[in-house]
Amino acid sequence: MKIKLPLLACTSLLLAIIVNAQTGQPSQNESWLRYTVKGEEFSVTLPVEPAMKTSDVFVTRLNKSRLERVIEAKVGEVTYRVYVYENPKPRQSLKEFVVEQTGRSDLDLTFERDLNVGKFAGQQYSSHDRDFPSTEQYFATEGRLYRFMVYGATVGHPGAQPFFASIALGKKHEGIEVIEGGMQPAESAQTIYTGKQVDTKVRLISKPEPSYPSQAKKRGIVGTVILKAVFSASGKVTNIRVAQGLPEGLTERAIAAARQIKFIPASKEGKFVSMWIQLEYNFNLY
C-alpha cells in the first residue's frame, strides 16, 4: 500500500508498509536524536525514543509536593535516564542535592570530577562494580535539579559518551518533545501486521506539515527523512525509528509531524490491530 499526500512545497509525505514489518525489528541504522521536555531546562541526545513518567511527590523537608519526572530509554543492557526534580524555594543547593541522591542510591557511587555545562555547575559520580556499573551527573539550574544517569556502563562506554557530551542546560531548547508515557512497549511479531494480513488497512484522517528549519534552508540541506513507526490499534503513532535522517533539525521536525498524524487503525476479524508503516518526508528547496 502506498498513500501519497500533498504537503507544503518544501515537503512531501509518502507512506508505505514496511516489507519486513512482521519481524518487528527496528533498523540497525538508528541515529541519536536530541530530546527535550516542554517547560524544562534541558535537552539531551538518546539512541531511541524515550518514555516519560511525571509524578507529584510529597517532600518532607518542603512539607509539600513537588513535580518529579523520569525520562528513560533502553538499548540492550544499557539504560539511559534523566531524573527531573522541581526545586521550589527554599532552593536546594547542588551539594545538598548530590548528598541526598547518592545517599539514597543502592549503588556504590564515588565522586569523579566537577563539571560545567554552560553557566551551570555539576558533579559526576560512578559505580565501577562489575555487576552494577553506572555513571551519574548532577546539575542544578534556576528552578530544577537534574540527574543524568547511564546504568549498565561506565563513562568510557561508547554509549555513555555521546549521552553525557550532549547534555545542554538552560531555557528554550530545540529537540523532539518527549510526551507523557512516550514510547510504547515493542509489540511482538504476532501483534503487528502487514497490509496483506489485515482486513482493512490504515486510513488517514489528517496529517501534519513538518516545518523547514531556517538554518537548514540557509545551508541548503535537502533530502529524505525515512521513519519506521507503529500505527497502533489505540490510534497513536508509536515506536518511531529513524531509518534515514537529515541534519539541522530536519529529522526532529519529521518525527514531530509523524506523532500528530490522525488515522483509523487497521482492522482484522473485526478488531483494530497495529501495523508497521514507513514514512518518507522529502525536504526540497525550490
Image: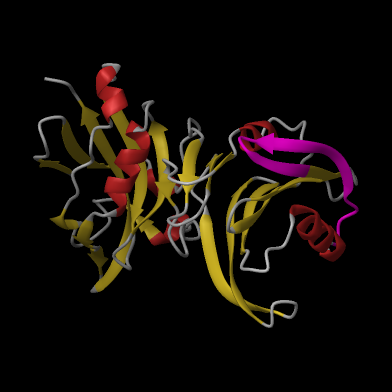
Q: Vertical placement of 64 versus 79: above or below?
A: below
Residue lying at 36% horizontally and 48% vertically, measured from the top left: 229
| Corner quadrant of residue 75 | top right
The foreground one among 35 and 77 is 35
In the rendered image, residue 50, in percent from the top left (x then y), is placed at 52, 52
Please state the extent of the stretch shown in magenta in the rendering. 106-123
Q: In the image as oriented, which residue stretches furthest toward the front?
A: 90
Quarter of the C terminus within the rendering: top left
Q: Vertical placement of 39 versus 281: above or below?
A: below
Residue 100 counted in the magenta span: no
In the rendered image, residue 78, in percent from the top left (x then y), is placed at 69, 45
The foreground one among 120 and 59 is 120
| Corner quadrant of residue 6 | top left
Q: Vertical placement of 265 versus 218: above or below?
A: below
Q: Is residue 186 left or right of residue 199?
A: right
Residue lying at 84% horizontally and 50% vertically, measured from the top left: 132
Q: Is residue 208 left or right of residue 101?
A: left
Whether residue 19 is visible, yes or no, is no
In the rendered image, residue 117, in percent from the top left (x then y), is placed at 64, 36
| Corner quadrant of residue 124 | top right
Chief secondary structure of the magenta span? strand
Quarter of the N terminus within the rendering: top left
In the rendered image, residue 120, in percent from the top left (x then y), is placed at 65, 42
Residue lying at 23% horizontally and 38% vertically, measured from the top left: 211
Q: Vertical placement of 201 versus 282: above or below?
A: below
Q: In the image as oriented, which residue stretches furthest toward the top?
A: 220
The foreground one among 41 and 101 is 41
